[in-house]
Each structure stands twice: as structure tokens, then as C-alpha cells.
Image: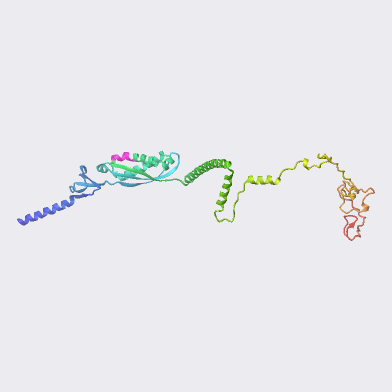
Amino acid sequence: MVQALVVALVAVLAGGLVYAMAAARVVKQYERGVVLRLGRLHDEVRPPGFTMIVPGVDRLRKVNMQIVTMPVPAQDGITRDNVTVRVDAVIYFKVVDPASAVIQVEDYRFAVSQMAQTSLRSIIGKSDLDDLLSDREKLNQGLELMIDSPAVGWGVQIDRVEIKDVSLPETMKRSMARQAEADRERRARVINADAELQASKKLAQAAQQMSTQPAALQLRLLQTVVAVAAEKNSTLVLPFPVELLRFLERAQQGPQPSVAAGRPQDGSGQPAPERPAEPAEPASPMDPDVVDPAVTAQTFTDQPLPDAPLTDGDTGPDGSLPEAAPDGVPEFDPETVPEFDPEPSGRRRGNPFSHH
């Protein structure tokens, strides 16, 4: 009898141990337990720590309450000013109602990811390119409101949404680079012009101040020479005032003599009257120093000259030249025998068209 009681007790203890092992659950600090008893939600959400469920009847689902960081895949879209961009973002959310996260949505992570992608494409289409590049804080707030509205019913709270990167086409990047370069060049030119204006005003004031004291210009000249000669230079630049050059030029010219001082004086001391200049005699046309008589004695004509040298027999009694053929070439006489010039020069006379 005692043995039977001991065996029964051991069996009960073993059964209790098995039941305890099957019913025991541990919920971590960052988790909450949602119990489904026979498929129905149990009202009590199990806190962190050790908890017991009915084996075979209850089913415990643990829900992570930590903040989840989820990257949103890059989305291609067209902005309001018709620019194709590619934008990716990151979303931070956490579960605030474990029961709703288990009951209201099948997979709250996947639901939040899809909602973030669709909201990101929507915010791209409603924004300009300048807003995407410069006013991201406003876009992040709008994107957070768009995602948080449906996520409230899922027991999920959106903490923050950030746009990470905005990818632009290469053509748009080059255009923006040229625009930025042109804007910087414009500002540089304005700054240089403003500096020139201020410098000109200061120079005008300095010139006005130096004009009152001539020695100041000489001191400034000496300062410039000292500044140039400070380094080991082989060339010394020495400015020379233009006014000094003009003074030396006037001193070199001297006083102009009067006209009366240059005239000869007569016995009374008065300047003698000027004699009228005698007209020069015209040169004689036959003056050998002016014209060669041999040239003036020749008779010129407008008839063409023959190709061969002329002899004494080729000219007429009055020294005129024989008439040439209509085509400008002298007539050829076949009976004329060519004669050679007995002079040592070797020039031949007669028909210029004869052959050797």
C-alpha cells in the first residue's frame, strides 16, 4: 500500500513537472506577451518575466517593443517640375499596442514598409526639386504624417522619417553645376567691382590729401622704393614723376629770344628795316646743270620702236622713225642680206628677223 502511494506520488510529481515545463514561458524586458486562448485574444497582456500558460490551450506570441530601424528602398519618381529623381529614406517606428499589432495586421513590419514606399513616391510627386534638395525637414514631417495615419490602427507609432539620398540624372547635375558656377562668378564680379569702387574713393582721398603737401608724394615715392628693394632683386624699379620731366623740358628750352633783338640796327639804334627778298632767276631750260642738251635736241614720237637697234640709215631725213606694220612688227624683206657689225661688241645690223 505504501509502495503504491509512493509510486502515485512520484507519478503526480513527474506529471506536474512536465506540465510546468510545458506551461512555463519567459518574456524578456523589451517584449510583451499576447496570449491567444483557443484562438481568442486573452485580455491580459503578459508583462516581462516568468509567466505560465495552459499547454495545448493557450498560445503566446511575443511582440518586440524596441524601436525598429527600417530602410525604405529607393523609389523613382518625377517631381512637380518634371525632373526624374531617385530617393531613398529610412523610417524609425515602434509598437505601442501589442494586441493591435498582432490582431489588426498580419505582418506590421511589411505593412509599414509598403506604406513608407507609397508615401515616399507620393511626396516626390508633390514636391519640387529645390524642396527635395534644400527643404528636407518639411518633407520629412509630411512623410511622417502620411505614414503615421494608417499605422495608428496597427498599434505602431512612427517616431521619425528621414530622406537619405536624392539621386539626380547626370545632365541635371551638370546643369546645376553650371548654374552654381555662374552664380559664384557673378558674385565674384560684384565683389571685385565693389572693391574697385571703394579703392578708387580711398585713392581720391589720398590724392587730395597729398596735393596739400607736395613733400608727401616724395615720401610715398621713397616708401615704394624701399618696398621694392626689400627683397634680393637684381632690378630696381624707380618711379619718376611726370611733372619733373616737364619741368626739365621747360628748363632746357630756355627763354625765347625776341624778334627785335635778332634784327640788325642802323646808326640811330633803331632796327634796320627788312629788305624784301629778291626773286630767284628761273633756271635756263638749256642750263647744263639742269637739263642735258643732248636730251632736249632729240625728237620724240609716239611710233613704236623696232626690236633691233637703229642705225643712221634707218631714220629719215628729219630724224623720224620709219612707219611700222599695222601689227607693230617691221616688214621683212627677204632680199636683204644680214650684215654683221664690225664693232667688237658683236651686235648685228640689218633685219632683226634674220638667222645666224
- Residue placed most toward the observer, 169 or 219: 219
Helix, strand or loop: magenta stretch: helix
Residue 338 horizontal side relative to residue 150, left or right: right
Image position, residue 54 (x, y; %):
17, 47
- Residue placed most toward the observer, 91 or 25: 91
Image position, residue 67 (x, y; %):
30, 46
**Residue drawn at (9%, 56%) of the image:** 7
Residue 336 figure quarter: bottom right
Residue 36 figure quarter: top left
Name, please, the residue furthest toward the front.
Answer: 268
Quadrant of image for the C terminus: bottom right
Residue 167 horizontal side relative to residue 6, left or right: right
Name, please, the residue furthest toward the right.
Answer: 317
- In the image, residue 148 lies in the stretch drawn in magenta: yes
Q: How many marks?
A: 0
Name, please, the residue furthest toward the left.
Answer: 1
**Residue drawn at (44%, 43%) of the image:** 84
Quadrant of image for the N terminus: bottom left
The region drawn magenta spans: 147-153
Image position, residue 141 (x, y; %):
36, 40
- In the image, residue 42 lies in the stretch drawn in magenta: no
- Residue placed most toward the observer, 199 or 289: 199
Image position, residue 334 (x, y; %):
91, 54
**Residue drawn at (57%, 49%) of the image:** 222
